[in-house]
Image (spheres, coloured by chain):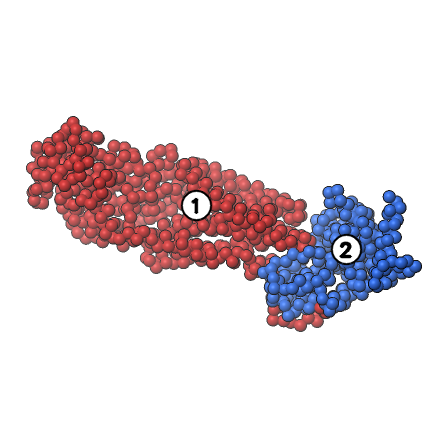
Chain colours: A red, B blue
């Protein structure tokens, strides 16, 4: 040690660079933030929690967008809260409180710099992860553009998690604070998930909630992404962060009376924001394509997204939303042969066009109904929702499985639509049978539908006991199907049909043998004969004016 | 006077740590001596504005630190080395010193040079880029001294600064103290009377929360004359003599 003066000190390579005080303070904190140690762990967790599952899903922006909010934050938020607590408790753990407490910079300002550094790193990693995932999604040719609202909510979750943990660490410095903070945040997220399952309206504010229980194509593809919930969540999370950070500025050692007053104002404003956002979420209602909060809703976002469909050729063209372009050959391959055979019949679809799964608030518990295929309009168009099915590549599902599912689940429904069988008896069952629901006037419709199922090979591989539900395979809530449901396999117990299905057609009337005979007769016709008979009698069949004996 | 202490007391629960201290100090090095539990650290923490006094009044650098604004002004011109130095293991020496320079609100343009000077002054130039976790106890102590002096304080409070320093470093540190004491008020709390003899222009001796002696080292040495006070060095004998006399007086009073 020498009594050197400042001017005598020789310049050195390590000499610090001049910069503005707060910027330099932040720079030091950034270089030495313990959060740096956590970044590789978070990157690995992102890969397993989000990237890999995302690659097992179709390259849709809405799916990828929701994953960077829900999947990523489920694992990030607890860890970030723990890391924030570790950073926040640094002064206490390291015995620095006296030394830092006698410096001129208000302690709260110094703490904010420490929190900011940790949060900047966490945000940087999160955004880098999102950039990778979105970049890959863009390279996969996803239709439309990336959704930024889920990313905004994700960044708010990062900041709020760090702030909550930091506040806990600063107020209760200790070795176990970090672990406890992580656990508490994890339990809070889990509790939110349960609250959502219980359909509590206020719980919609849960930060991992993207658009409630909607299937993927209800928002962001056929309709714009509704920002209502995201805005409320941002308000909620910003409020949490402000309340937590404000709380760190309340102790007497934090700074001047004025500064502590400002911290109190920030904390109170944060709590007010949390309360307001939660109250707004309480007014949320589930509508056709997302969660609507009236006070935040922009009616312009209710208009469907404009797009030019991609269509396949054939007697009955199949048109899909361009986001589904890659699946057009599979859809055409699955439905084309059936649609060709039915083409030209009165009421048969002249075109198939994809639609969003219909979603309605059928109950006060926000029940969602998934629609099945519907033939409607003049000329008749087959409206075909696809999001309820497992798409090729989704969860490593092969294209053959998609084609098979499409034929076996939607084929009988399309036939039902054609012959005029009524829709399912009501929400939650999705099953129709000769005895149970449909009157005797529809026996011929059942027989024809069953025969068509047989000749079109629509129900040959359904497992015993399987029941087709309208829109089956969706990310389901209540399945109050609006589409026509049907018992799988044969409706009538015709040759080749399952015994249980045959029994369901027995009972009061008609006799199974009579039904089976009708089915067998119609099946035995040539394609041309069937087509000719249907062309002549389909209207009467739909009206319930054809009896079993009249079936050729 | 940079330090004016009048009747200052400090209680921690039922323990009276400082029991009415009067002290005045101008530029120079004041050694604060006393046995364990005498109240030296409590007095130093009050002077450093870590804790407020329970009673009495303090004026530091001409300001009353009870008000936040004045306390903040004092803190800008204060250097403090606590007895137990905490540190962030991941910081380098230079970063640690710079960190405190910034927290002391030094003008940013002056920080680089001040950091360099402080690090060089404490003999840590070669270790400036070393992480604190890699340093020995003595080096950490020097890093603590560097952060205390980085803002060229007008009031420097050092609690056991030479603990852990090797003899060579202690000699150098005493020289640094003398240099700093030319313009600033330096108060050094220590058990090591040889530090006081070598570096301090004035000495105060505390016992049982009171200052029982304040004068020059020579005056303290003179207190041993005519007594059989124990000690290897003259200053130690003076220290022992003053303590014995103070305790005798206190015993007689009680």
Image check: B175 left or right of A236? right
One can see residue A340 in this view: yes
Q: What subunit carries mark 1?
A: A
Image check: A321 left or right of B162? left
Return the mark for residue A195.
none
Q: Quadrant of residue A427?
A: top left
Q: CA distance from mark 1 to mark 2?
A: 55 Å
Kindly identify the residue that appears in the image at 7 percent across and 42 percent down. A525
Q: Residues within 10 Å of mark 1 (few under 14, many from 20)?
A: many
Kindly identify the residue that appears in the image at 48 percent across and 42 percent down. A188
Q: Position of residue A492 (x, y in %)?
A: 15, 36
| Residue with the mark numbered 1 | A208
| Residue with the mark numbered 2 | B61
State the residue in front, A445 or B201.
B201
Q: Residues within 10 Å of mark 2 (few under 14, many from 20)?
A: many
Q: Position of residue B170 (x, y in %)?
A: 74, 66
State the residue in front, A277 or A515.
A515
Image check: A350 left or right of B168? left
Kindly identify the residue that appears in the image at 76 percent across and 64 percent down. B177
Q: Is residue A96 above or below residue A377?
A: below
State the residue in front, A123 or A23.
A123
Q: What subunit carries mark 2?
A: B
Q: Is residue A206 above or below residue A514?
A: below
Quadrant containing the C terminus of chain A in the rendered view: top left
């Amino acid at each position: 040690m020498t009594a050197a003066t400042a001017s005598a000190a020789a310049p050195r390579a390590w000499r610090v660079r001049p910069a503005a005080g707060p910027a330099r303070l932040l720079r030091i904190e950034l270089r030495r933030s313990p959060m740096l140690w956590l970044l590789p762990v978070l990157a690995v967790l992102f890969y397993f929690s989000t990237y890999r599952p995302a690659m097992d899903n179709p390259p849709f922006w809405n799916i990828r967008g929701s994953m960077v909010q829900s999947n990523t934050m489920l694992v990030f938020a607890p860890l970030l809260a723990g890391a924030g607590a570790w950073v926040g408790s640094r002064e206490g753990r390291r015995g620095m409180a006296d030394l830092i407490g006698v410096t001129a910079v208000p302690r709260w300002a110094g703490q904010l710099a420490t929190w900011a550094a940790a949060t900047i790193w966490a945000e940087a990693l999160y955004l880098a992860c999102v950039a990778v995932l979105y970049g890959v999604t863009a390279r996969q040719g996803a239709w439309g553009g990336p959704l930024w609202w889920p990313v905004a909510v994700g960044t708010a979750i990062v900041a709020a998690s760090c702030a909550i943990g930091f506040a806990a660490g600063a107020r209760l410095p200790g070795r176990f604070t970090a672990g406890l903070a992580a656990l508490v945040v994890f339990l809070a997220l889990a509790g939110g998930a349960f609250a959502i399952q219980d359909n509590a309206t206020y719980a919609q504010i849960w930060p991992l909630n993207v658009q409630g229980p909607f299937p993927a194509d209800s928002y962001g593809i056929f309709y714009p992404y509704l920002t209502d919930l995201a805005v409320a969540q941002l308000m909620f999370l910003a409020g949490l962060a402000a309340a937590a950070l404000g709380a760190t500025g309340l102790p007497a050692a934090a700074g001047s009376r004025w500064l502590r007053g400002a911290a109190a104002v920030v904390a109170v404003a944060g709590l007010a924001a949390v309360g307001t956002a939660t109250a707004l979420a309480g007014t949320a209602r589930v509508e056709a394509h997302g969660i609507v909060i009236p006070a935040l809703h922009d009616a312009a976002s209710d208009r469907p997204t404009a797009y030019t469909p991609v269509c396949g050729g054939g007697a009955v063209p199949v048109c899909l939303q361009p986001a589904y372009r890659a699946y057009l050959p599979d859809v055409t391959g699955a439905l084309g042969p059936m649609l060709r055979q039915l083409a030209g019949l009165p009421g048969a679809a002249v075109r198939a066009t994809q639609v969003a799964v219909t979603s309605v608030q059928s109950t006060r518990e926000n029940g969602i109904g998934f629609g099945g295929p519907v033939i409607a309009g003049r000329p008749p168009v087959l409206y075909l929702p696809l999001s309820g099915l497992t798409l090729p590549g989704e969860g490593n599902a092969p294209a053959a499985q998609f084609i098979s599912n499409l034929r076996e689940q939607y084929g009988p429904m399309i036939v039902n639509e054609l012959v005029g069988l009524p829709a399912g008896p009501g929400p939650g069952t999705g099953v129709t049978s000769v005895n149970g629901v449909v009157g005797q006037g529809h026996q011929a419709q059942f027989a024809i539908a069953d025969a068509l199922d047989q000749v079109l090979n629509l129900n040959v591989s359904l497992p015993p006991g399987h029941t087709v539900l309208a829109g089956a395979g969706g990310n389901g809530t209540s399945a109050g199907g609006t589409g026509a449901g049907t018992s799988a396999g044969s409706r009538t117990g015709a040759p080749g049909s399952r015994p249980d299905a045959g029994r369901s057609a027995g009972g009061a009337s008609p006799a199974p043998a009579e039904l089976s005979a009708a089915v067998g007769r119609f099946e035995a016709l040539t394609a041309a004969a069937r087509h000719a008979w249907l062309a002549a009698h389909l209207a009467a069949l739909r009206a319930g004016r054809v009896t079993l004996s009249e079936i050729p | 006077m940079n330090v004016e202490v009048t009747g200052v007391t400090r209680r921690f629960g039922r323990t009276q740590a400082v029991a009415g201290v009067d002290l005045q100090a101008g530029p120079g090095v004041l050694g604060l001596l006393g046995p364990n539990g005498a109240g030296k650290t409590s007095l130093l923490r009050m002077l450093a504005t870590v804790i407020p006094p329970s009673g009495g009044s303090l004026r530091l650098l001409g300001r009353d630190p009870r008000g936040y604004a004045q306390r903040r002004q004092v803190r800008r011109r204060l250097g403090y080395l606590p007895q137990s130095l905490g540190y962030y293991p991941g910081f380098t020496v230079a970063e640690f010193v710079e960190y405190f320079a910034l927290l002391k609100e030094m003008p940013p343009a002056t920080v680089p040079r001040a950091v360099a000077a402080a690090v060089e002054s404490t003999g840590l130039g070669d270790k400036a880029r070393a992480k604190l976790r890699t340093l020995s106890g003595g080096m950490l102590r020097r890093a603590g001294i560097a952060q205390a002096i980085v803002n060229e304080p007008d009031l420097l409070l050092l609690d056991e600064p030479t603990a852990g320093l090797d003899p060579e470093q202690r000699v150098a540190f005493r020289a640094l103290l003398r240099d700093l004491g030319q313009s600033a008020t330096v108060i050094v709390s220590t058990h090591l009377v040889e530090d006081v003899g070598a570096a301090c222009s004035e000495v105060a001796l505390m016992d049982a929360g009171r200052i029982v002696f304040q004068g020059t080292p020579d005056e303290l040495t003179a207190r041993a004359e005519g007594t059989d006070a124990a000690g290897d060095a003259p200053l130690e004998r003076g220290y022992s003599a003053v303590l014995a006399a103070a305790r005798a007086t206190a015993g007689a009073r009680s």
